[in-house]
Amino acid sequence: MRPLLILLCIFTTLAASAASKLPPPAPRPADFTFIDTSIENGSPLHWDFAADGSILLSLQYDHERASPNRAAGHWHFRLDGKPGSSHTLVFQNFLNVWNGTSGLPVDARTACLLSADGRSWRSEKMELVDQRVQLRVTLGPTGSLYVARVEPYRLSDLDQLLARLRPHPLVQIEVIGHTVEHRPLEIIRLGRESAPHRVFLRARAHPWEPGGNWVIEGLVAALLADTPVARAHLDQVAYYILPMANKDGVARGRTRFNLRGIDLNRGWDQPASPELCPENHALEQWLAAMAARHLRPHFALELHNDNNGQLHVSRPAVPDLPAYLEGMQRFEALLRRHTWFTEGSTGAKFRNPGTLGDGWLERFGIPAAVLEFNAHWIAGKQKAPLGADWQEFGRALPTVFADYFAPAPRVP
């Protein structure tokens, strides 16, 4: 026992010596109360104070399985303090790593969304300083302020959408499987199963990217508007929508991966593991069942957010690649004609193997693409995006697909 006691004494002495060299903690500002991350979709983070009273916010990473990749780009929390008090928020610790290359998920264009009630949001420009972004905020009369990177879309918002849709005669909702934490994965069908054309859309493969959910809200509103145009369109096109692929990540305020470290927009070049990736496995099983009934989608679109906002067109070695590229060129032109989309598509040598856009074309012969929405700036509207802007985009999508599937004009 004596050697163990000696080692313990040495360790205690060294630890005390190291602690004595640490700077004293910065004092808490008198008008600050708390950073609350227990709100729905709240982001995990650590917070502390700088000597000047600034609030230092360190985002927490989530990691990809068996790789060096890590991601931290989602923030959503509530700041509580004295009504009328002002605070400087400094966001740090989000140097992401992707395939061995590090990079920031923010830049000089990054804005932050603020809300007094967590529902009505406004955009405020942030300042980029030495790989950190910061913002000065003032608390309103309630003493609380919700802070988010992009306008949140929560599980409760999806539940409300599903509740509104269930009684509708043109809607069918099917649970196709479950997430790692056994949350249900729903496919929403709008329109007749016997419609001659079928479109598949998936959103929220990456939890921090709610733009696709807002697009789907707008799309659904347009399709179910009970107008002659909407009814005629649903006679021709059936929509199959998986609105929230990574529900666990959304619930836990994560950034990119599922709870077992899998990126749901990768791995589509091979069958998905039902243990590690039950979300993609369920979708594969659904697609196989649709194919067995001769109901495969004629077009698939994966909805995301990023820092650029482009249509990602892949080029796997498939026999009908020229026809696919021609169709995507036409689809991009229709987006430009009917929506505020102006960012264009990826270059002639682009390929991103494993994405849904690439994998569904290569493995299943389904024309597919990834559509990214710039989380910082809408070039076509010259403004920072809010949920209403993405809903506006979604309301225009039925017109895009109506023209996409329209018969080609006869040449005289």
Image (tube, rainbow, N blue to C red):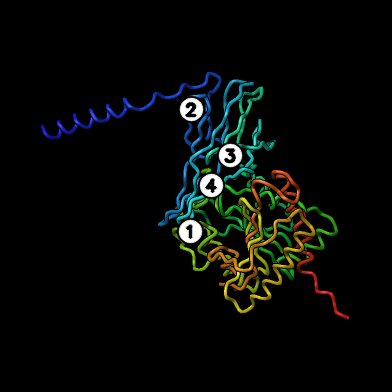
Which residue bears the numbered disc 2?
49
Q: Are marks 4 and 3 in contact (CB under 8 Å)?
A: no
Q: Of circles 3 and 2, which is in front?
A: 3
From mark 2 to mark 1, how far is it between C-alphas? 39 Å
282 lies above or below 58: below
From mark 4 to mark 2, how far is it between C-alphas? 23 Å
Q: Can residue 369 be seen in this view?
A: no
Q: Of the residues under marks 4 and 1, which one precedes in the sequence?
A: 4
Could you tell me residue 254's position as x and y percent?
Answer: 52, 45
298 lies above or below 37: below
Q: In which quarter of the image is residue 156?
A: top right
- Location of the C terminus by quadrant is bottom right
Could you tell me residue 74's position as x and y percent?
Answer: 55, 43
Mark 3 element type:
strand
Which residue bears the numbered disc 4?
104
Q: Of the residues under marks 3 and 2, which one precedes in the sequence?
A: 2
Mark 1 element type:
loop
Which residue bears the numbered disc 3?
128
Identify the amino acid type marked 2. Phe
Identify the amino acid type marked 4. Leu
Which residue bears the numbered disc 1?
277
Could you tell me residue 70's position as x and y percent?
Answer: 46, 50
Identify the amino acid type marked 3. Leu
Q: Residue at x 84, y 55 (%)?
A: 227
Q: Residue at x 73, y 65 (%)?
A: 331
Could you tell me residue 309's position as x and y percent?
Answer: 66, 54
Q: Do the residues labelled 3 and 2 touch (CB within 8 Å)?
A: no
Identify the amino acid type marked 1. Cys
